[in-house]
Amino acid sequence: MSDTTLADAIQADTDSGRRLRVRAEIPWLTIVAPAVFFVAFIGAWELLVKVRDIHVLLLPAPSVIWRQFVEDFSLLRVLAKNTAIESLKGVLIGAVMAIGLAGLVQPVGWLNKSLLMYSSTIKALPIVALYPLCTVFFGITSAAVVAMVAIGITPIMYTFAARGFSGTSQEDDLMRSISAGRFIRFRFLVLPRALPYVMAGMKTAVPLSIIVAIISEYFGGRVTTLGSHIRRESQQLHTPEMWSAIVMACLLGIVAFGAVSLLDRYFLRWHTSRRDD
Amino acid sequence: MLGLRAEGLGKEFTTAGVLALRDLNLEVEQGGFMSVIGPSGCGKSTLLRIFSDLAEPTSGIAEVNGKSPREARIAREFGVVFQSPNLLAWRTVLRNVMLPLQVMGIDRAERQQTAHKMLDLVGLSEFARHHPLQLSGGMQQRVAIARALSMNPSVLFMDEPFGALDEITRDRLNLELMRIWSQLSATILFITHSITEAVLLSTQVAVMSGRPGHIHKVIDIDLAHPRTAETREDPRFYKHVLDVRRALTEASHE
């Protein structure tokens, strides 16, 4: 916002004071403190391994892991890409199913309630236990992993989307007063009103999708994925290689969460939470 | 033809067992500005909701421009300004004002032109591209007024539109509403808690009494138009304020 419009706003309205919130402080708590903690943690780890002379197969020093990571990077990148594609497919399938279902079911109260109950039950399930079933249906393939992710994501997204769709507000009166039909009401009001809930769901679902994908791969899946790589290296006691794959898995998780946060920021730039942070 | 008419209007909320309105009679000329004032919970908002087809009466007749509220709503003859601005937060100010026109299926160029004109009218042209939450409460309510006016309604329902605003903003918006009203020839039904606001704005003030709600008294306000800040210093203004206050006291002891 340019200075002129800001000044005009102050002039135009006496009660506009609350929009003037300067936030140009050093992000002490969000960046500096975690960074200091990270450096201290890595330093202590390195020191511990050196001083106690811990064997590399038990616990490699961070410097060793880093060297291994750099060495394996081109391989790890491919593995991470495959894992990412599997999670993304699963998330998309799960989210579309959940949002579509929630939108269709929303007008039917009892159906919505029973589906919410089912989704709570599925959420409580240790879904890894379902993986053998998935391999029965899909074989030990990428599709089985995608299916696992979709199963894990659907109940979460359903819960969030159902909450988003069920909200009523005075805007419903507005839509009626301008004689908006059912479809227009859904498109102009119900769908965008549910968006903050959907994005909140995605923030939970996307990191989870990577966890589910890697665990499923670990139990059997395409060879060229992070999970199966970690399993192979652990079986051969290649501890530094395992650690470098774990580092890649962490990076993947961070990148995925960052991407969702950016999308969230873009789609919800009008939202209250953008103003009060 | 009358702008608004209610005859023997009754409303019972059966689930709560509350009789909100009983035998309410009211007439507003076309182009008239009627304020409805009364103690809390006397059914003012219910009356407005019946006229704007957001609630159904249990007995009696309500008419808007000689039509049933439902017919008038479908013909888009009235606009509603609610107690809270009810703007769609994800739409810019301009696109909020365009919403009714978009629903009506009016083409893009025309609805943009109309919306800009309406924003001009409420003095918010520069804020067309802002999102509602970037604006103050008073500005948001002005956007809501622009939106209600965009359909070019002949009747405007306003349910305590300035109730949540501070005194100074409210005073300014009152005068702005007077200016807008003088440029249109709309019939306005205005619900308020403020006696001075009712007197300043209206051609008639209807004082309601509650439990069950009905019209206690209708007071004509014969102050000259256009009403300005000076109107508040007119001795007749104070006489009317006293009249309304007295009627309101009677109504609450009834």
Image (tube, coloured by chain):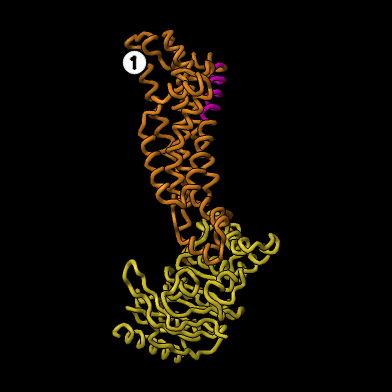
Chain colours: A orange, B yellow
Q: Residue furthest right?
A: B109
Under circle 1, the secondary element is: helix
Q: Residue at x 40, y 88 (%)?
A: B217
Q: Nearer the viewer, residue A4 or A114?
A: A114
Place residue B60 in its image quadrant. Answer: bottom left
Q: Nearer the viewer, residue A33 or B219?
A: B219
Q: Position of residue B203 (x, y in %)?
A: 50, 86
Residue position marked by numbered label 1 in the rendering: A48
Q: Is residue A104 above or below residue A72?
A: below
Q: Residue at x 49, y 85 (%)?
A: B27
| Res. A151 in view | yes
Place residue A168 in its image quadrant. Answer: bottom left
Q: Which amino acid, by three-letter code, is at mark 1? A: Leu
Q: Position of residue A77 (x, y in %)?
A: 55, 21
Q: Is residue B121 magenta?
A: no
Q: Position of residue A148 (x, y in %)?
A: 46, 28
